Image: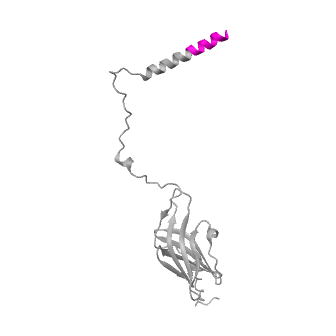
Amino acid sequence: MRTVGFLAGAVLALGFASVSFAQDELPKDAPAAPKPVTPAAPAQEQQEPSALPPGTMIEEPVAVLQALDKVTARIKRLSVHVGQTGKFGTLSILVDACRKAPPEDQPESAAFLKIIDGKSDPPVAAFSGWMFASSPALSAMDHPVYDISVVDCTSDTIAAPSSAASGPAPLPPPAKPSATPSH
């Protein structure tokens, strides 16, 4: 019985093999197999996609920085164009690059800054590197008097004024005493 099962399996396997070989052989007068047709893409689909790959940042022309004088507690917002230098106290802040994440990604702005302290002679480099708006302590400037951080990278040349820089609202003038006598 065991031999019959083995022989039946072998015959069955040979039958499937001969069928597969027969399918590979075409008659000599048969037409060639059709080639797969790829649909012609419209010109619009051949262009680059408008969305940026994840992790790609957009170059912006203006860096919005926040400067703090630790001695006087004065805070000031600075808008500095890429390639130009901003001043705060004795610091000169050169913005070499400013990049911002696209709106569909996590919000992030980063600027490459070169900060020179002109107090000493010759001027000393206080910081050179990337600063990130979302985590200022990641690459912070170590200075005893001043602190600089990136707020945003933008295409606007006028940054929103800082509420701390404008100071408290002025008090209204005191009320004048009335000229009518009171009985």
> Looking at the image, which residue is at 53% across and 17% down?
14
The front one of 170 and 127 is: 127
In reply to whether residue 6 is colored magenta, the answer given is: yes
Residue 23 sits in which quadrant? Answer: top left
Horizontally, residue 144 falls left or right of residue 31, namely right
Locate residue 140, reporting x and y percent: 62, 72
What main secondary structure does the magenta stretch of the protein show?
Answer: helix
Q: Residue at x 49, y 79 (%)?
A: 85
Residue 93 in the image: above or below residue 12 = below
Q: Position of residue 76 (x, y in %)?
A: 56, 78
Q: Quadrant of residue 146 in the image?
A: bottom right
Q: Which quadrant of the figure contains the C terminus? A: bottom right
Name the residue located 64 percent from the left edge and 77 percent from the top edge.
142
Check the picture and name the quadrant holding the N terminus: top right
User: From what the image shows, is residue 140 above or below residue 47?
Assistant: below
Residue 95 sits inside the magenta stretch: no
Q: Position of residue 129 (x, y in %)?
A: 57, 71
Q: How is the image coloured?
A: one colour
Q: What span is colored magenta in the figure?
A: 1-11
Relative to 135, say whether 23 is above or below: above
Q: Disc count in the image? A: 0
Residue 1 lies left or right of residue 133; in this view the side is: right
